[in-house]
Structure formats: structure tokens, C-alpha cells
Image (spheres, grey):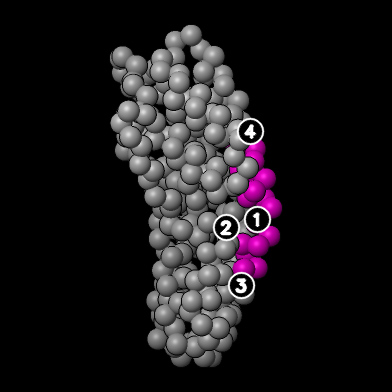
Amino acid sequence: MNKSFIILVLALTVQVTLGAPRTAVHTSNVISPESGDVNSNQRFDFVEDVYENLQNTVWSKAIYEQASEYLQGVKSWSQSNEKLKESSIYGDLQKHLDNCLNLLKELSANPEDCKKQWSLKKEHDEIRQLFDSVDDAKLRRGWVEKYMNFVTPLRVEVTSAYEKFYSHLTSEVESYLSSANVSSKDELREWLGKFKRQTDHVKKQKLVMELLALFPNERQVLDAKCEVQYSNGL
């Protein structure tokens, strides 16, 4: 199995990127902020609720549990595989596996710890890069098989979780638009129309990015706490 095939396999799994890029929005499409403190108005409450619901969808309990099983499996396999133990990546692999498992243990106690979630993404990407760099097709294939056994069953759960999030988001935007205090409704109505018509999962994710980008002041406050995540990177 060559490296390009591994990259293709990973690209087809559940959002293996380290986080989606920011979406550019023309300033003419940015919804003007309400007067007063950005942290204490209806607009901020709306954006914060969308943000929190998105994070809870991206990082579900099922993902933590199954990620722990997958990484424990990789660790056991690596410690019993003589070729891997003799390889140049073995020491670094054990370090990053231990870091991931420790972070997952901490996240089980505090599942919404955004900084630890970002650290977990980074550590797991190090594991991915190690296997992509190793000059042994059998070892690369061994890890890819274990990784696929982890992400493939999650596809149904992840898709279902996002569908619930999208449904709730639609209702939430409709409710926000119905408020008499909301200004600049045209941009949101236009966004909502596109969102309702869209059926492609990946394109819907992009539209969620576009929605949050319409609220740069509120987004800045939320990103200061911890940058919004559109995928878990595992």
C-alpha cells in the first residue's frame, strides 16, 4: 500500500482534518452588531448556543469511548509487533499514544475541555504522520486497518448526530429571526434558505462556518475562550 493510497483512505473517513478553515465573508454580508455589551445581548446568546451545540456534536461521548479503545488497540499491537518495535518511529509512537490516552482520560472527566480537545487532535495527527513516514507497507497497512475499524462504525453515529444538530439549528435560526429585536434579517434569511435546500453533508458543514462568520464580534469572543471546532480531527 503506497502513501498516496493511505492519504486517500484517510480523506474519505470521518473528517480527518485538524479543523476546518475559516470561511471568508464579505464585510457587506456581516450582520451589524447590536449596541451594548457583546457578551450580554440576544445576538450573543444565539451565537453562543449555536457554538456550544456544534462542539457537543463534534465531540460526543461515543467518540471519546471508541477513540480510547482504538488507541489502546494500536498500543497493544505496537508493543507486540517486533518489526514496529525495531522501527525508527517506535519511541515517538509510544509517546504520542500515551499522550492521547492520558488526554482521553482527562476528557472523560471534563468532556468539554476545549484546549485538551485541540491537544488530542494534535497528538493524533502526530501518530498519523509517523505511520505515513514509516518505510514499511505492512506496518502502514496494519495501522490503517485499525484506524478504519475505529472510524467506519462511527460514520452512522456521527451522521445522525449532525442531522440532529442541523435540524435544531434550523429551528434556532427561525426562532431568532422571529424576534422583533433582531436587525439585518435579510442575510440570515438568505443563509437559512440555502441551508434548508442543501442536502450534502459536507456543504452543510461549510454553511455552518458561513453562519458563524456572519457574527465576527461574537465569534471573536468565543474564539478567545477556545477556537471553534468543526471536526474532531480523529
69 or 184: nearer the eye? 184
- Density class for disc 1 (Cα within 10 Å; few <14, some 14-19, many ≥20) is some
Mark 1 — residue? 155
Q: Name the dominant secondary structure of the magenta segment.
A: helix
Mark 3 — residue? 146
Q: Quick check: marks 3 and 4 in contact, CB under 8 Å?
A: no
Residue pictured at 59% horizontal, 80% vertical: 142
Residue 197 horizontal side relative to residue 94, left or right: right
Give the amino acid at mark 2: Val
Image quarter for residue 69?
A: bottom right
Give the amino acid at mark 4: Ser
Residue pictured at 37% horizontal, 45% vertical: 22
Q: Quick check: marks 2 and 1 in contact, CB under 8 Å?
A: yes
- x and y percentages locating residue 41 in the rendered image: 39, 17
Residue pictured at 45% horizontal, 33% vertical: 211
In what element is the residue under mark 4?
helix
24 or 48: nearer the eye? 24
Name the disc covering residue 167, or none: 4
Marks 3, 4: nearer the viewer: 4
Mark 2 — residue? 14
- x and y percentages locating residue 59 in the rendered image: 54, 47
- Density class for disc 2 (Cα within 10 Å; few <14, some 14-19, many ≥20) is some
Segment colored magenta: 148-167
Spatial CA span between label 1 and label 3: 15 Å
Q: Is residue 117 above or below residue 204?
A: below
Give the amino acid at mark 1: Arg
Instruction: Please give the count of numbered marks on the rendered protein.
Output: 4
